[in-house]
Image (tube, helix red, strand yellow):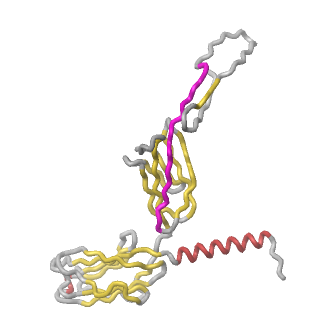
Amino acid sequence: MKNFTFKSIGKLLMLAVFSLFSVYATNAQCTYQIELTDPGYGDGWNGGRVTVFVNGTAVLTDITLAGGYGPEYHDFSAATGDEITTDYTGGGWSYENNYKILDPGGNIQFETGYPNGTPSDLVSPGVTANCPVSGDILVTVTDAGGNPMQGVEVGVIDVNTLYTDAAGEALFSGVEVGIHTVYAFQPGVNYIEQEAEVFLGQTTNVDFVMAPPVMVINPLAIVETLNPNEWFTTYIGIQNIGDGDLFWTAEVV
C-alpha cells in the first residue's frame, strides 16, 4: 500500500477542487439571442427564415420576421464550449434581411446580411459559447426600525462600491462565483461586514441593519492646574448606549 504524506494529500485536495471548478466553469449555461431585422425596406423577411443549431441540434427552427423593420429577438440556451451555427434560407428581396447572434451581455458575436447582401449561413466552427461563471449580490440596508436607508456606501471588497437607492438596495451584477466579503458603511452610524457566497446564475441576498452608536462621556471636561513636575490622575467614563458599534480615539491637548 502506498503511503501519502499530509503534503501529498493537500496537493490532491487542491487538484480535486481545481478539477471541480473547471467542470463547473465548462458546464456553465447561459442565454444567447438571435436578432432579426429588415433594415433594407422594413417589410419583414418575405418568406425568409433561419434555423439556429447548438452542437448540431436545432434549437430554433425556421424563425422569421413577419413584418416591419424589427428588431425581433429569440432566446436560446448554450453552455460554455458549445458550437453555435445557423442555416439561412432566403425569401423575396433577401438582400434586405439582417440577423445577429448576441452573447449574454448583448455583444454581437456574428452578423450577416444588409447592407452587404443576402445573409449567409454561420458555418462550423461557428460561434463558441462562453458563459460567465458569475451571479449577483443584492444588498439591502435598513435602520433599526426596518426602514430603508438611502445613500449608504456598500461594497463587495475587491469588486465594486455602490450606494443604496431609495429602497435601501444596491445590486452587484456579474460577481464571480465564490465567497466574498460585503460591507456597509455610513458616517456617524457604523461599519458592518459579512461574508456572502455567490452561486452561478443566482442572486445572493445580503441584509444589513444599521443603528447609530450613542456615546456618553462623563465628565465632558477636566480642568486642572498643575505646577511643574506635578502629576494628576483621573478617570473618564465612555459608554455606548446605542445599538451600533462605537469606535473612538482620544488625545490630550
Rendering coords of residue 136 (x, y %)? 46, 61
Asked if residue 12 can be seen in this view, the reply is yes
Rendering coords of residue 35 (x, y %)? 29, 76
Q: Residue at x 37, y 46 (%)?
A: 166
Left or right? Give the position of 13 relative to 98: right
Q: Where 125 falls versus 156 (above or below)?
A: below
Residue 211 is a magenta residue: yes
Q: Residue at x 57, y 60 (%)?
A: 179
Asked if residue 120 can be seen in this view, the reply is no
Left or right? Give the position of 202 relative to 228: left
How many numbered discs, if any?
Answer: 0
Magenta part mainly helix, strand or loop?
A: strand
Residue 185 is a magenta residue: no
Left or right? Give the position of 26 relative to 88: right
Q: Where 227 falls versus 146 (above or below)?
A: above
Rendering coords of residue 68 (x, y %)? 17, 76
Quarter placement of the N terminus: bottom right
Magenta segment range? Answer: 201-219
Which quarter of the picture shows residue 224? top right
Left or right? Give the position of 182 relative to 152: right
